[in-house]
Amino acid sequence: MTNELLNELTFFVLAIFVGFEVISKVPTILHTPLMSGTNAIHGIILVGALLIAAGANSPVTIVLGLVAVTLATTNVVGGFVVTDRMLEMFKGRQAPKK
Amino acid sequence: MNTLLALAYLLAAVLFILGLKQLSSPKGARNGNFTAAAGMVIALGATIPLLHFTSAGIVIIAIGLVIGTVVGTVGARLVHMTAIPQMVALFNGVGGGAAALVAVAELMRLGVHPPFAEVFPSVFSIVIGSISFAGSMVAFSKLQELMTGTPITYPGQQIVNLLLAAAIVGFAVAVLAIASVPFSFLSLMVLALILGVAFVLPIGGADMPVVISLLNAATGLAVAASGFTLNNFALIVAGTLVGASGSLLTKLMSDAMGRSLANVLFGAFGQARAGIAAVAGGGQARNVRSASAEDLGTLLAYSQRVIIVPGYGLAVAQAQHAARELADVLEKRGVEVEYAIHPVAGRMPGHMNVLLAEANVPYEQLKEMDQVNDDFKNADVALIVGANDVVNPAARSTPGSPIYGMPILNADQAKNIIFMKRSMRPGFAGIDNELMFGPKTVMFFGDAKDSLTKLVSAVKAA
């Protein structure tokens, strides 16, 4: 096993524990926004899509790259915007009644 | 990996974790989303120096970024609040699809005999990403009512799905053993897409939130796997965070429905329904009481305490503003008004809170189930607006019922129950609700918004 793979595995295992711990006490009302927020975070796949698209040099890789970048961008942008829209309303309801 | 890049990715990872932490508490939730978005911008920015553009590459990236940004922003901005669950499904699906495509492209770049450490995560990413993509699209179609929301089942379905899964595992092992040509990866992708569809078809519309959450976690893992293929730490850490927190969230969601995850996924709902429908068949001609808006307006106006139970019907009719208006006129007359929010009211946990917050309903009036359940017996009226299964006493009393064991709101304990519904049609769970036939219950048929508006005038006139 290479050093790099060992490092990656270490990050992977630690991230599992952090992922479990960080949301262990979440109230029901935040389930949907939290799901939507994590949904936006896995849009990080855009980094991967950029890496493969940048070097595209054949018809197949061009199509793959274009579709991957488009889908991943939709995931990131849509994910964060829709989460914000949900949470915008939580702010509204905490304001004192007019 | 150079130092600057590594530090930028580390910073991004920290921001993701802080963002998730803030997202788990009502106070910081909105900032949490910004924090996570900042992490994303940093991770993306740090990646740019890594890119060695071909002329085609720079063009397709520009086109992809523009299309994705427009589709994502417009979709997320224009969608109705009631349609948000399917929007999340859609955004999750495209992420899964992207993860699978990234893995395919990377394997093609690596050529005919890529090392095992690259092939294994790629195969994982292709399979899971494709399942997530196809499954999310079915979930989207079900919630958007492009297809029926009821479970689609046929004899031997479990066996077919099992065989599909076995075929994928077998194929994946073969691919790993002979580490071969791109064509085999595409076949694997097609099989996984079929399994994704087949897996979600037998699950009913009411259970889609749990499925979407599960597929969300799956996409996270697919992204992490793509990270192993590309040796990219940002993908590994962020993907794994989502995979882990998403799995936990999926469990929390099915707990809120009082059911196990296995029960949600493997169609127990659908199977139980046939039996119940047969039993309930004779009950269709039963009488219910209904009343005029004026009568109900008077009842409400002279109550001490009214608890409103909002459900999906309220959301569909966009009646949250009308509900608040009714609450306002009642409060002006000195009636105490609260909203009882079931954990799975609407289509997703927390969905109803979002809708009511949109109508500026004060936070203090929104009561979670545990806070409010003991208050029903002191309430003069429980006003049920487009909710059904969450107040069905069968969950307490009928062991054979598909919703047996689900925690419900004790609306049946109120002195009077006004049940506002469009029709006698059963709710998501597809079963009759005894409460509608109860001696204390009055039905008030009609679109939730119209009905509420009528009640507002009736209360004013009373």
Image (tube, coloured by chain):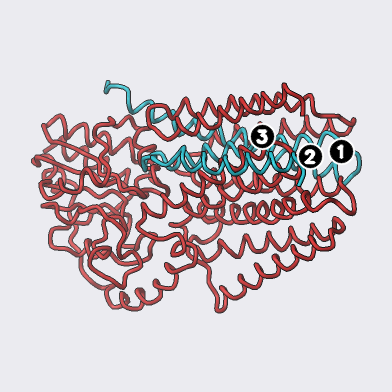
Chain colours: A cyan, B red
Q: Is residue B126 left or right of residue B299?
A: right
Q: Is residue B118 left or right of residue B92?
A: right
Q: CA distance from mark 2 to mark 1?
A: 9 Å
Q: Can you identify the residue that label 2 sits on? A: A66
Q: Can you identify the residue that label 1 sits on? A: A56
The amino acid type found where label 2 is placed reads: Leu
Q: Are marks 3 and 1 in contact (CB under 8 Å)?
A: no
Check disc 1: other Cα within 10 Å, few if <14, some if 14-19, many if 20+: many
Q: Can you identify the residue that label 3 sits on? A: B234
Q: Are marks 2 and 3 in contact (CB under 8 Å)?
A: no
Kind of element beneath mark 3: helix
With respect to residue B258, does A92 lie above or below?
A: above
Kind of element beneath mark 1: loop
**Where does the image place residue A35, in percent across and percent down from the top left?**
49, 42
Q: Quadrant of residue A77?
A: top right
Q: CA distance from mark 3 to mark 1?
A: 22 Å
Q: Chain of mark 3?
A: B
**Where does the image place residue B162, in percent across and percent down from the top left?**
61, 71
Q: Which mark is nearer the camera, 2 or 3?
A: 3
Q: Which mark is nearer the camera, 2 or 1?
A: 1
Q: Is residue A86 left or right of residue A96?
A: right
Q: Chain of mark 1?
A: A
Q: CA distance from mark 2 to mark 3?
A: 21 Å
Check disc 3: other Cα within 10 Å, few if <14, some if 14-19, many if 20+: many
- Could you confirm whether marks 2 and 1 are on the same chain? yes
Q: Are marks 2 and 1 in contact (CB under 8 Å)?
A: yes
Check disc 2: other Cα within 10 Å, few if <14, some if 14-19, many if 20+: many
Kindly identify the residue that appears in the image at 67 percent across and 38 percent down. B235
Q: Which mark is nearer the camera, 3 or 1?
A: 3
Residue B11: image tag: none
Q: Chain of mark 2?
A: A
Kindly identify the residue that appears in the image at 33 percent across and 28 percent down. A93
